[in-house]
Image: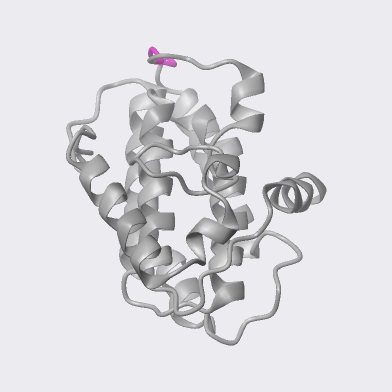
Amino acid sequence: MVVKSSETRDWLGCIEPKSVRAVMKRIVEDLITIDWTVGQFFEEGKRVDKSSESSRRTSGLQSFGQSSTLKPLSKFSTSQIAGSPREFADTTLSSTLGKLWTEKVEYFSSVQFNRLSVTSGVVKICLKTLLESVRLKTFGKFGLQQMQVDCRYLQTLLWRFVQDEKLVDTLLDEILSSTLNRCIEVQLMEPSVIELICEVT
């Protein structure tokens, strides 16, 4: 489902995003079903470094920062992103160097007998699939903006299904980073617009 949605979409010629893609909503719906089903047989399990609800609403995928963790876009403006080739190269280099200090994600690590461990495994594989699909495509301006919207939507919801929500931030950050590197016309959407689209979805 994830691969097909990426392969069949015209990322170069798509229109300005007005909503979250249907496949992203389907991913969340399927995870809710899996979460409920697994919960009938296993205990919940323990979470790591639980963040406040307010930080989940306001931080992260509004934009892409200079490290491998999600930062507010206000610190990394559209003009900086869409500046000279040298500026963009410096930004890409900073992002790459930041990944050296990021804990490596083990996509196929052992699964414990609890609900959060099972759903965390599903989320990791799902986001890894999306990441690999992005690496095979070329994006236009609106394609990049659509991915911004989709990633922000996932960030606000997927934390419920993982033991460590930093995992979601790291993977979504990689997806956006790859999208930026594959984009021929880098112009990010304003954070306030992204939030509005996600809220009305």
The magenta segment is: 43-47
Please provide percent x and percent y for residue 86. 34, 66
Residue 39's spot in the image, x, y percent? 48, 24
Report the residue at 52% width, 47% height from top: 76
- Residue in the image at 24% along x and 51% along y: 96
Q: Is residue 107 visible?
A: no
Decide which of 190, 80 is in the foreground and name it: 80
* Residue at the spot 40% in from the left edge and 34% down from the top edge: 119
Asked where in the image residue 143 lies, by quadrant, the reply is bottom right
Res 74 quadrant in image? top right
Residue under the point 64% across and 64% down: 21
- In x, y percent, where is residue 169? 43, 37
- Residue 151 visible, this orientation: yes
Decide whether residue 121 is among the magenta residues. no
Residue 178 appears at what percent x and percent y? 35, 62
Q: Is residue 30 left or right of residue 88?
A: right
